[in-house]
Image (cartoon, rainbow, N blue to C red):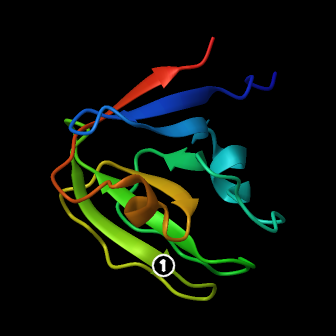
């Protein structure tokens, strides 16, 4: 039996901004395996939340991503603002999850390392 896809909203507590409006939680083997493969881009505020995760690869991807590493408290512990296709991120030991957004999204929405994010399921 397949699990229904679950989408989340992501808010930056420091700025109060809604930085993610449609973030898919990849919490099954198939969702994690598929990731964003086959996509040609992400819309503003659209993303993929991988948990648990400390490192990502861009093998087979067609477009760069902004990769945000989160610790167990939802604090951004690292940001790679433009991870390009074919690249592999460093392993961030303090991370328990990663949210992938369109490249440049951290700068565009004013999110930086040290910001706490709140993830809430969409209804």
Q: Position of residue 98 (x, y in %)?
A: 42, 53
Quadrant of the frame with the N terminus: top right
Position of 70 compared to 122: left or right? left
Query: Nearest the camera: 56 or 119?
Result: 119
Specify the quadrant of the image occupied by residue 28: top right
Residue in the image at 69% along x and 77% along y: 63
Residue in the image at 63% along x and 51% along y: 44
Position of 94 compared to 12: left or right? left
Specify the quadrant of the image occupied by residue 3: top right
* Residue extending furthest toward the bottom: 86
Residue 27 in sight in this render: no
Which class describes the residues within 10 Å of circle 1: few (<14), some (14-19), or many (20+)? some
Q: Secondary structure at mark 1?
A: strand
Quadrant of the frame with the C terminus: top right
Residue located beneath label 1 in the image: 82
Residue in the image at 45% along x and 21% along y: 120
Query: Nearest the camera: 75 or 18?
Result: 18
* Residue extending furthest toward the top: 123
Above-or-below relation of 56 to 12: below
Q: Position of residue 111 (x, y in %)?
A: 31, 54
Residue 22 in sight in this render: yes
């Amino acid at each position: 039996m397949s699990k229904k896809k679950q989408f989340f909203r992501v808010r930056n507590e420091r700025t109060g901004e809604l930085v993610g409006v449609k973030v898919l939680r990849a919490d099954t083997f198939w969702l994690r395996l598929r990731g964003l493969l086959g996509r040609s881009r992400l819309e503003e505020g659209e993303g993929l939340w991988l948990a648990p995760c400390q490192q990502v690869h861009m093998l087979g991807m067609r477009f760069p991503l902004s990769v945000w590493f989160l610790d167990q408290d939802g604090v951004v512990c690292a940001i790679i603002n433009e991870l390009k296709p074919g690249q592999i991120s460093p392993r961030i030991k303090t991370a328990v999850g990663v949210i992938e957004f369109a490249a440049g999204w951290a700068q565009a929405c004013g999110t930086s390392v040290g910001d706490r994010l709140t993830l809430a399921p969409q209804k």
